Image: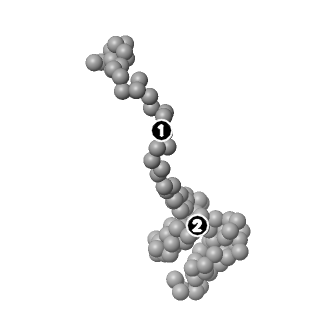
Amino acid sequence: MLLAANRTSLISPLRSIKLSHLTKSDSLGEYMPTIVNVRDAKTNFSRLLERAHDGEEIVLAKAGKPYAKLVPLEERKERKPGLAKGAVTDAFFGPLPAEELDAWGQ
């Protein structure tokens, strides 16, 4: 159990449930973000971080008002060499025109 059983944390704007339920999502968790007060978030940060990493959106509230959002990072896409092949022509490597150099102060 995370904290004493009589301790509650606001999980959605519609209802409160026991803080011990912070370890699992309930059926509404798929449709509504979990809202956790900052004090409870400090105490249970590692667990909340794991839940966010697993895809859950968690809203941190300060004095009962939404303050910040804890969400998973987007996975990096693998870089593919040659994606811009042919986009850079030989003109790119040529000298700049005089007016362009003047604009840069050279």
Label drawn at residue 85: 1
Q: Residue at x 30, y 18 (%)?
A: 105
Using the numbered discs, state the Cα–Cα distance from disc 1 to disc 2 in whole angstroms. 35 Å
Asked which colour scheme the image uses, the reply is one colour
Would you say the residues marked 1 and 2 are in contact, meaning their CB atoms lie under 8 Å apart? no
- Judge whether 22 appears above or below 102 on screen: below
Which residue appears at 68% of the width and 68% of the height? 30
Furthest residue in direction top, as rendered:
99
The mark that comes first in sequence, 1 or 2, is: 2
Q: Tally the numbered discs.
A: 2
Whether residue 100 is visible, yes or no, is yes
Looking at the image, can residue 103 be seen? no
In this rendered view, identify the residue nearer to me: 24 or 35. Answer: 24
Q: Residues within 10 Å of mark 1 (few under 14, many from 20)?
A: few
Question: Tag 1: residue type?
Answer: Lys
Question: Relative to 29, does residue 66 appear above or below in the rendering?
Answer: above
Which quadrant does the C terminus fall into? top left
Q: Mark 2 points at which residue?
A: 55
Indicate the secondary structure of the residue bearing disc 2: loop
- What residue sits 59% from the left and 59% below the top? 66
Amino acid bearing label 2: Gly
Q: Residue 89: x percent and y percent?
A: 44, 28
Residue 19 is situated, as x and y percent measured from the top left of the image, at 58, 79
Q: Is residue 78 left or right of residue 23?
A: left
Instruction: Judge by depth and name the residue closer to the eye, 97 or 6.
Output: 97
Q: Which residue is drawn at 49% across and 69% down?
A: 49
Residue 76 versus residue 102 in the image, above or below: below
